[in-house]
Amino acid sequence: MASVSVKRVTVDNGISVFYRTASPPNLPNAPIVLLLHGYPSSSHQYRHLIPILADQYTVIAPDFPGFGFTEVPPSRDYKYAFASLTTTLAAFLDALSITSFVAYIFDYGAPVLLRLALQRPGAITAIISQNGNAYEEGLGPSWIPIRAFWASSHAEEREAVRTNVLTADTTKWKYTHGSRFPDVIEPESYTLDAALLQRPGNVEIQLDLFKDYENNVKLYPQFQEYFRTSQVPLLAVWGKHDRSFTQPGAEAFKRDLPRAEVVLLDAGHFAGETENEEIAELILKFLAKQKL
């Protein structure tokens, strides 16, 4: 099994992007699989998946600004919005000379990747979406307090998200809810996420991103047009008990991508924590079918 390295590259005017990577030792030109994490995690969520995929692919998993171990200097005056995350991701890909890749998207990774797809549609050879939403019907009940935040600029709604969503208990719940095997989820996963989210200033960053997520929803029609125009091969692997991004969001892909494959897992939001081997097998079969 390939060993995983942790690296950094400075891009986008001073941002030190932390990423994990692994490659097949005897395949120097192996196709690239880019793993994009979601809220409230980082590339750490792919710690078990990377070595499996790296038997055949070069796997790269960066941390977005505001997450994990990516560092944004205060002097950068970075605007934490999904357009900015996309700009940083594009700069990261350019720095590593990556022009073609398979994308695995989860949660926040979905709108970042799909924004990039509007700019560079030819770069993406296939998409695996694990609870990475692109349809309004996929927005589940967990978004109710955040929708209220979108609809108002009052401090009360921002405070409600801060106190009810940005907590260690809620972070743990996102990992364990809907899982068949909550007792086998490694506690360092949600504990690390909760600790990093509570770094000085980071709660405000997360609130800004929650507020800005409304702009991703406004782009859903454009994302769907990208699907229809490109007919990009897509595999949706979905934890069907997720209350953030629900099952109808997975099934909706077939409306614009009739050849999309949709697999519903008996899992929650972080399906990869307990269904990792099944997900890896599905990915490898899907990519082999696409001759990638």
Image (spheres, rainbow, N blue to C red):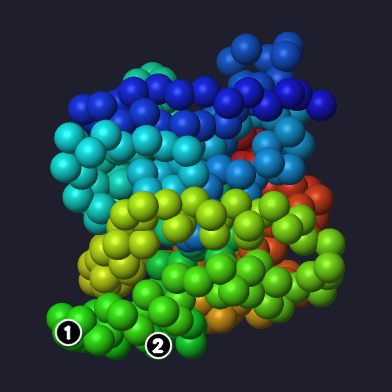
Going 37% across and 75% down the picture, which residue do you hit?
Answer: 162
Q: What residue type is labelled 2?
A: Ile
Q: Which is more toward the observer, 163 or 17?
A: 163
* Above or below, comparing residue 165 to residue 184 in the picture: below
Residue 158: tell me if it is visible. Answer: yes
Outermost residue, front direction? 200
Q: Mark 1 points at which residue?
A: 154
Quadrant, the C terminus: top right
Label 2 environment density (alpha carbons within 10 Å; few <14, some 14–19, many ≥20)? few
Q: Which of marks 1 and 2 is in front?
A: 1
Q: Which is more toward the observer, 191 or 132?
A: 191
Badge 2 marks a residue whose secondary structure is helix
* Above or below, comparing residue 88 to residue 155 in the picture: above
* Above or below, comparing residue 273 to residue 252 in the picture: above
Q: Mark 2 points at which residue?
A: 144
Q: How far apart are marks 1 and 2 (CA)?
A: 16 Å
Badge 1 marks a residue whose secondary structure is loop
Going 73% across and 14% down the picture, which residue do you hit?
Answer: 25
Residue 56: tell me if it is visible. Answer: no
Quadrant, the N terminus: top right
Residue 264 location in percent, x, y?
Answer: 69, 71
In the drawing, does residue 105 fall left or right of residue 56?
left
> Which quadrant of the figure has residue 136?
bottom left
Label 1 environment density (alpha carbons within 10 Å; few <14, some 14–19, many ≥20)? few
In the drawing, does residue 274 fall left or right of residue 57?
right
